[in-house]
Image (cartoon, rainbow, N blue to C red):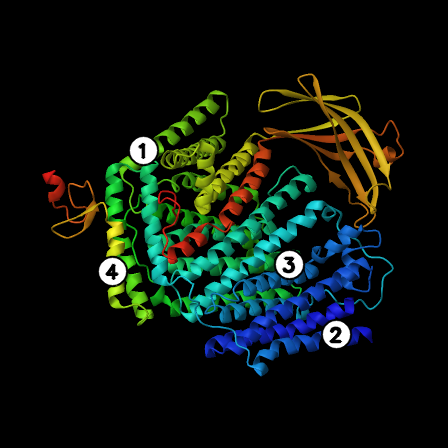
Amino acid sequence: MGVALGAALIALSAVLFIVQPMFRGLHASLEREDDEMTDTEARKRVALLALRDVEYDFLAGKLDEQDYRSLKGELTAEALAALEADESSKSLSAVGARGPDGIEAEIALARQRMFADMVACDACSFANEAESRFCSACGSALLSTAAG
Amino acid sequence: MTLLGEFALWIALPLTMWGMVMGFAGGRTQRGDMVLSAERSIYASSLALTIASAGIIAAFVGDRFEYWYVANYSNINLEFFYKVTGLWAGQRGSLLFWALILSYFACAAVFMNRNKNREFMPYVAGVLQTIMWFFVVVLLFADVNPFERLPFAPADGRGLNPQLQNYWMTIHPPTLYLGFTSFTVPFAFAVAALLNGRLDARWIQLTRRWILLSWFFLSIGIVFGMRWAYEELGWGGYWFWDPVENASLLPWLTATAFLHSIQIQETRGMLKVWNMSLVVVTFVLTIFATFLTRSGLIESVHSFAQELKIAYIFLGFMTSILGASVVLILYRRESLQSENQIESFVSRESAFLFNNLILLGAAFAVFWGTIFPLVAEGVTGQAISVGPPFFNRVNIPIGLVLLTLAGIGPVIAWRRASKKNLQRNFQWPVAVGLVVVAALWVSGARHLYALATWGIGAFVTTVIAVEFFKGTRARARIEGEGYPLAFFHLVTRNRRRWGGYIVHMAMVLIFAGFAGSAYNVDERVHVQPGDVVNVESPFGHTYQMSYEGLSVSQGKGQRNLDFQVIALVTASRDGKVLERMTTEKRRYVTGDPGQLITEVGIRSTFFEDLYLILSAVDDADGALRNDPNAQGIDLEILIKPLVNWIWIGGFMLAIGALIGLWPSADKRRLAMESAGQEPSEPVVVGAS
């Protein structure tokens, strides 16, 4: 008898527990949370981490100068693309939250941060390492260092 | 309690079914109330399964032999400890135990994601409940109900198999099951991503940690199993390529492949279909493992006519899962296209890819070798056995290639490695490897595979040691930290990378230990008290094994123990006494009366184990009477070089995996980044 009662109680409370949301109108969220990384954010992160990785490999003496330069050039370009994609997706999702000027400024700032010690190529405007003599992207000579 | 447990198992059936329907329907219609209901049903089913398991344990502890399962796996005299662990001692209980652990992982997944990843959760809940439902259905309808009652209540049970009355038995199955069942969660996330169409990097991030957790449990479960075999099965080995062992190795191989190939997806946006397939295959292989070990298929190879309801249910379930997953992947193939291509054959990407192919090749060979006898016997009716020679012949070369890759992968450059990069990173490690091989050759080692393993092991060790050294040095230089602190920060700031390297080192140790078996010494002798046997170690010294005689103990110790016949052997090395070793024959009152269980004697040192097996007693009855003329025995003396390295490697592997699992600094860094702050950590260390 006791067993039957216990069983009935357990069954009843389990049923109540799981059907309650339907009757009481309780909802689980199905939306993406704000603090979650978006796809573009994730890409940006990966690109930046890859850059750091190459930097680490170079400083640790695992990559020689030449490999470092060419890899870093590629990764920088990718990181920049990811950065811009992320910013533009944010401006799309947060309509009106920030003015377009604010975003432009942010991109410019990010660019500046990233290329503080870099030289833009005159031919293709690719950003190269400060002391580069040739552009990593198109191979043309870089005037600033060629002059110096 | 037991009745209540039985009832709870029946309750779990509608609960899991409800959750399955509500999860999928709620996801499809985007109704939050249905999803909440599905999630709650997971907690409720888990409670039901807990009550059911408690019911079984209560039946064991209360000696309720009217239950078939208890009558077959326990008896009154069984120690309390083994009664509790009776839950997973046999097929029926372990299926319930499996469902129970799965339900706990399901609860953890739902609870941890109550405020995040909400897009995935409806389908995650649906998939988890589907799998749980399946196990409940098997338990209730496939003639394996642990609550099944006998028409009468026997006075006592048949007892637990004596070989399972060992402490490893209580640790090894649960860890393996933790590994197997936890793979369900990443599988659920993968399917959820396929269903909701969010196939960006997110699901990889979500599954990676879960897979690593499962991989951690599975790895230690396998190592524990090897240790149990080594200590308890009494034949001196730790791996026999039997179907049960193979079944646990298969998902381990594919999960290892996944842990490597996701790195290509993360950094290069490639191999998405491949990764998705690996998750599916790994999960199906965990079900296959239960199928193989718990469906009764193996025990019944010699009675194929017998109806195997449970085998058909499992086969049907695996086929449906595979089929549904393939359809889903095909349906989403557009979103799963690669964003990049491999640029060069000599690059880290291609090393990873190669590693994956090799692991899958090994998995296939093991899979085929495992099921071939079953298939062949089913078709031809003749028993064919595929034994260790086949598996070793195939897997040793594969293992060597993998081991080599464990050294190449960490340092070869992404995208394309230049000649200089290769030279810079590999010339010293290769040199060290060659020197080690040469030194071993000079000291007399001639076994090809063993030499190759140790040479490659030295290569990998050097690569990784140099990695650690260079990383520490760079950090010490840039940060101005002392070397110990720099080393600590190096590891803690990028746990995933350095944890991985530690696991690679662990694999080197384990492989080196395997290779040690090429130099096993095996002496079988018949001895009388006073006899001394000289056994030469491959390391050059000689052991003098002096047999002292038998000692008998009756009705003592463990409660089910009938008698022990203990052989005393004094081990000396080059004339110096080392240790008094024992090896025994035991008989238990339960089980087959003619069955004698061997307890081996092990003297373990860093470089080699001395392993004694009491193969046979000339006259057991005489020995039990302490008859001085009945002291002759067959003794097997084994020397097993480097076997300890396997266990040390297993320990190291666990540490490496834990380092990789530990919540990283990433979260903090991310929070700071999004708050607009620069991470305080210098750019140089962040990686991976």
Question: Which amino acid type is marked by label 3?
Answer: Arg
Q: Numbered disc 3: what chain?
A: B
> Residue B682 or B677: which is nearer the viewer?
B677
Residue positioned 37% across, 53% down in the render: B677
Q: Are marks 2 and 1 on the same chain?
A: no
Mark 1 against mark 3, which lies toward the viewer?
1
In space, the residues marked 4 and 3 are separated at their CA atoms by: 64 Å
Q: SS for tag 3?
A: helix
Q: Which residue is mark 1?
A: B424
Residue positioned 29% across, 58% down in the render: A82
Q: SS for tag 1?
A: helix
In space, the residues marked 2 and 1 are separated at their CA atoms by: 71 Å
**What is the number of the mark on residue B294?**
3
In space, the residues marked 4 and 1 are separated at their CA atoms by: 43 Å
Q: SS for tag 4?
A: helix
In the image, B162: left or right of B511? right
